[in-house]
Image (cartoon, grey):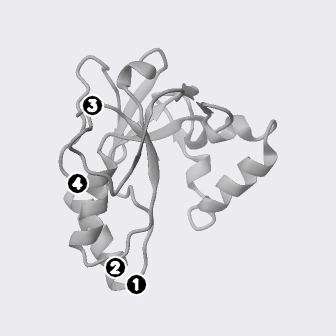
Amino acid sequence: MTGSVLYPLNDMRTPHPDIYQREMAKYASRAELPATMLPKLDCLWNDVLHCSPIHPRRLYDAWLSQGVEHVPDKVFFQIPIGRVAHHPVAIMRGRELEWLDPARYREITAVPAETVAWYGKLASQGRFGAHFVGVPHVLVKGPIDVEGVEVVNWHDSMSHVATTGARPE
């Protein structure tokens, strides 16, 4: 992110090599991901922004349900789907990629069982991270201006949150 705009990681390589290197370090244990081709979008894994179609509070609650007592603060942008509708947007479920129709988009209201099981495995090992394993990914091919969008912490109540939107991971 620079200013109020989120950019795909590969777009940061030249103008902001420090940011690029810092974020690429996250792939140290999964080196194959940055080289993964996304055929429908005709680009690489880091040529898109990865958003989540589930409110982060649901993920927070799933961590707690697996016995994690302290979940560190983590903030997310609540991006209305209209902010990304002008870009090519796809949703990835497992290894399946399909175009996302903004008019039919709905936020997921339950944490996938695979994600809860993953949290349980990590919690039993005393580990914490990889929050989006098993969660479908909304992949946006292009920058997203987040000026004025709501920023939520995943431990925030959902009572004031709309039920549609995508969030960067």
Q: Amino acid at mark 1?
A: Gly
The residue at the point 20 percent across, 60 percent down is 113
Q: Secondary structure at mark 3?
A: loop
Q: Secondary structure at mark 2?
A: helix
* x, y percent for residue 72: 44, 67
> Which callout, 2 or 4, points at the residue further toward the start of the chain?
4
**Label 1: which residue?**
126
> Which callout, 4 or 3, points at the residue further toward the start of the chain?
4
Q: Mark 2 and mark 1 in contact (Cβ < 8 Å)? A: yes
Q: Amino acid at mark 3?
A: Thr
Residue 22 or 101: which is nearer the viewer?
22
Q: Nearer the viewer, mark 3 or mark 2?
A: 3
Q: Is residue 58 left or right of residue 45?
A: left
**Label 2: which residue?**
123
| Figure label count | 4
The residue at the point 55 percent across, 52 percent down is 33
The Cα atoms of the two marked residues, 4 and 3, are separated by 15 Å
Extreme residue in the bottom direction: 125
Q: Mark 3 and mark 1 in contact (Cβ < 8 Å)? A: no
Q: Mark 4 and mark 1 in contact (Cβ < 8 Å)? A: no
Q: Residues within 10 Å of mark 1 (few under 14, many from 20)?
A: few
**Label 3: which residue?**
164
Q: Residues within 10 Å of mark 3 (few under 14, many from 20)?
A: some
Image disc number at residue 116:
none
**Label 4: which residue?**
111
* x, y percent for residue 122: 37, 76
The Cα atoms of the two marked residues, 3 and 2, are separated by 29 Å
Quarter location, residue 40:
top left
Q: Is residue 132 left or right of residue 147?
A: left
The Cα atoms of the two marked residues, 2 and 4, are separated by 16 Å
